[in-house]
Amino acid sequence: MNKKENTIAVALCDAGKILETLQHLNPEALNKKLNPRSNKPKDNQEQRTVRGCLDNIIETLKELLDDEVPEVKKLTCQNYTKINHDSNGNPRYYLPAYLCQEASVRELGGVKYRGKKYGAGWVFQTYNLESTNKILNHLEGNY
């Protein structure tokens, strides 16, 4: 996965979180009408709302992500990126966040990746990546 694909995936997650937060904290703000970009309103121009703009952003990001990233049915060892060893010398592997769900990752012992180099993702400490991958596929329902 390249940096562009990762950036699109992170932006999609962020847009969804913004929409959820606004809906929870201030639902009236989502229906607020935005000023048109030009001073002269056109007859066919609809009034834009915050919700409409966020929905358009999310749809655009989904389309970009679908164009950039092929559908991954089953995780393989090629989905992981080897990163620096931990302080005790144990090998660690990075997995992008969009490839798996948080519940199954945490059940397997994965922790959030906190660096900026690869973007949102999970880190596994393992000497046997094939076994970790097989268990994660089983937890995700990808047999």
Image: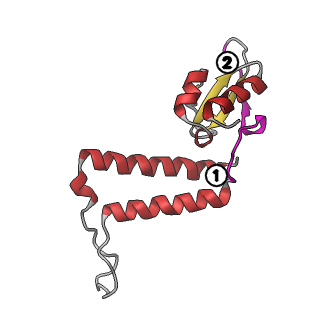
Of mark 1 and mark 2, the one earlier in the sequence is: 1
Q: Position of residue 87 (x, y in %)?
A: 66, 14
Q: Which residue is mark 2?
A: 86
Mark 1 or 2, closer to the camera = 1
Q: Position of residue 58 (x, y in %)?
A: 47, 58
Q: Quadrant of the C terminus?
A: top right
**Which mark is on residue 92?**
none
Residue drawn 32% across the image and 71% down it: 48
Q: Is residue 36 magenta?
A: no
* Amino acid at the residue labelled 2: Asp
Q: Position of residue 78 (x, y in %)?
A: 77, 38
66 lies above or below 99: below
- Report the residue that reaches farthest toward the top: 88
- Report the residue that reaches farthest toward the left: 28
Q: Is residue 112 left or right of residue 72?
A: left
Q: Which residue is mark 1?
A: 5
- Give the magenta part as a residue range: 70-87
